[in-house]
Image (cartoon, rainbow, N blue to C red):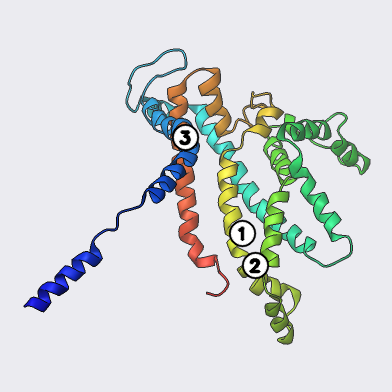
Amino acid sequence: MESTVKKRATTARVNKPKKRSSYERNIEWHGWLFASPWIIGLILFFAFPLFASIYFSFTTYSILQPGDFVGLQNYKDLMHDGLFWKSIYNTVYFAVLFVPLSILFGVSLAMMLNVKVKGMAIYRTIFFLPTLVPQVALAVLWMWLLNPGFGLVNGFLSSIGIEGPSWLGSEVWSKPSLIFMSLWGIGQAVVIYLAGLADISQDYYDAANVDGANWFQKTLNITLPLLSPVIFYNLVMGVIGAFQQFTLPYTLTQGKGSPANSLTFYVMYLYDNGFKYFKMGYASAMAWILFVIIMVLTGIIFLTSKRWVHYQGE
């Protein structure tokens, strides 16, 4: 009995929480102090606007007036807004074509730039340079190149007997033109693909050579499966970026979305409602619809990734 009491007393002394020293408390205090600018900035510029926009989406709030609570009326009005659906169509059209093409061209360019030849660093730099060009400057450059009258693209086509289209002035060719411009700046994705290719061990290719595999078989069975985590990352970021397309079409059309609103993208219409028409409640509702769309698509990509994303060592 006495030994049991002693054991319990010993256990209580062992499990008794150790009091922190003043030095440890000072270290913790200084840590919070150094992190406080970031925490305050997160609350003021991210958390507060986030929760405020949820409330504003149920009101007629504008920058000039506080507005009234209208419940789901903003969301109901959006369902009957023709330009809202047009902007969704334009954005989905862009995302469905641009994201797969960016992955296809990005992986292809990375594989070509991964070949060990003399001067490869120069070629890599050349393909990366377009990403350093600001979006506004890129828009001005391509407006000149695709000008139907004196643009270099139509000039080249006419020299080989082809009459070039109106490009940005045509409702049919405006979105393909924008996709082509966006593909011109995939250098960042190419760099990420190059890093993924460098991470693939040469042993896999040596074993495939012993088995007599050709280039296509090695690409299909080694390169693409082991590069799939990088493709997965660029796919997620590409979808998010495609649904937030704004600067390039806004600059090309001076915010008008012409011709015939074929370049009116979702975020452009959201921006117009919020800062041009001061319908901030309406714009907040659009923002949360966009958030839900992106979250659903990202969730679908994550759920399906288990079938096609392969990690080394698994």
Q: Which of the 4 image quarters holds residue 111?
A: bottom right
Labelled disc at residue 224: 2
**CA–CA distance between discs 1 and 2?**
9 Å
Disc 3 + disc 2, Cβ < 8 Å: no
Tell which circle, 1 or 3, labels the residue nearer the N-terminal end. 3
> Measured from the top left, where is residue 120 in percent x and y?
84, 60
Q: Secondary structure at mark 2?
A: helix
- Answer few, some or many: residues within 10 Å of disc 1's Cα (few below 14, many 20 plus, some between 14 and 19): many
Q: Which residue matches tag 3? A: 46
> Measured from the top left, where is residue 248 in percent x and y?
68, 34
Give the total number of marks visible in the rendering.
Answer: 3
Under mark 1, the amino acid is: Ile
Left or right of 115 on screen, residue 267: left
- Answer few, some or many: residues within 10 Å of disc 2's Cα (few below 14, many 20 plus, some between 14 and 19): some
Which residue is found at the position 11% from the left and 76% from the top? 4
Reply above or below: 136 against 305. above
Q: Which residue matches tag 1? A: 231
Under mark 3, the amino acid is: Phe
Q: Nearer the viewer, mark 3 or mark 2?
A: 3
Disc 1 + disc 2, Cβ < 8 Å: yes
Under mark 2, the amino acid is: Leu
**CA–CA distance between discs 1 and 3?**
29 Å
**CA–CA distance between discs 3 and 2?**
38 Å
Which residue is found at the position 42% from the left and 31% from the top? 48
> Measured from the top left, where is residue 110 in percent x and y?
74, 60
Q: Which of the 4 image quarters holds residue 174?
A: top right
